Image (cartoon, rainbow, N blue to C red):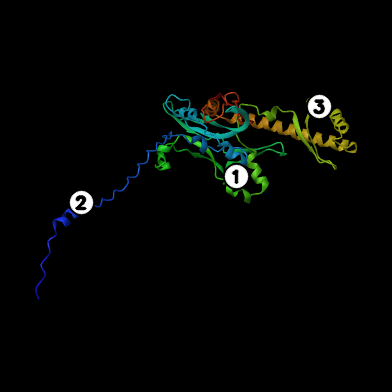
Amino acid sequence: MKRKARREPTKKEESKSSNAPSRAKRVKASKPEPEAEFFEEKRNMEDLWKETFPVGTEWDQFDLLYQFKWNFSNLEQAFEEGGKLYGKKVYLFGCSEPQLVSFKGENKVICVPAVVAVSGCKIITRLNLLKEVVSPFPPSDKIGINSVQREAEEIVPMKQMKMDWVPYIPLENRESQVDRLKTQIFILSCTQRRAALKHLKIDRVKKYEYCLPYFYQPFKEDELEQSTEVQIIFPAESKPVFCEFDWEFDDLEEFTDKLIEEEELDADQKDAFKDFVKEKVREAKKANREAREARKKVIEEMSEETKAAYESIKFYKFYPVQTDDSPDISNVKAPFINRYYGKAHEVL
């Protein structure tokens, strides 16, 4: 069989083919490159104030405490060379204070955070004329629990309230092993989880709100030792009688008559009330006397080195510095810490 010869295209066909539009290649649209994000570099101890437990703050106020971008760079700088806490072993605890302040033209009551630094807690033991050993110790391992509603003050171990002094590790050292770091900063920490509060009894939850860091200063007379007032909660039949009686300034007879006149006490319970007050006064005077004697004994048995250590202790109270992101608190700073610590030596 003969094969058919291939037909050559005519000039007309060639011309038509050359004029046909060529098929363009598909070009993929390039995606716009995302703009580079810049994150502000965190300071090495930026979270120090947040890691420090705000003792005595009500649980439902915690979120309000952190609603502003508070800046405690003054606390951080105190640990730098030339700062007040540089090279010292320091113990920190937090607190909060409800204050009326101005923010963006509006006056409002907010929770203002503060951090208390305890520096200089140390006992110096002289081994010989040429060598001294410095043994720092925490200011206290106890917590005071007290409020107007509670009849008696409690002093309990910190661990009973799931609190303890723990080392603070700056951000740049977080990858290191804690036991290899010679940390000089200890913070009061609490392991009680807020989510677990619903499983606790109300009284247990409220105890946290009445907690105060405890400190015993043997060289300073406690305010209770000086007080001449007693809290009276008299269990009357109709309704309890709440009042304060000052045995130095109040006359019991007149005091009782006034309560009857104001219909706070039934007249037929006058004698029972007076006996109740007298007993409370006796208890208070005894407690004051025992406290003074105990303090005197502690001082008598204390070594000169320990006395010097107590006298070297300093309390510093830090408030956040002023920024555009937080309220102006310059007018509400106060040196008072609590009834155990008294006033700070310096407010920053």
Q: Which residue is mark 3?
A: 250
Q: Are marks 1 and 2 in contact (CB under 8 Å)?
A: no
Q: Give coordinates of residue 329: x percent, y percent.
A: 58, 26
The residue nearer to you, when weighing 70 against 204, is 70
Taking depth in this image into account, of 136 and 246 the one nearest to the observer is 246
Rendered image: mark on residue 230: none
Asked which quadrant contains residue 58, the reply is top right
**Residue most toward the left?**
2
The type of residue carrying mark 2 is Asn
- Residue 155 visible in the snapshot: no
Sooner in the amino-acid sequence: mark 1 or mark 2: 2
Q: What residue occupies the far right of the structure in this picture?
A: 268
Residue type, mark 3 in image: Asp
For label 2, the residue is 19
Spot occupied by residue 89 in the image (x, y as percentages of width and height): 47, 32
The residue closer to the viewer here, 314 or 68, is: 68
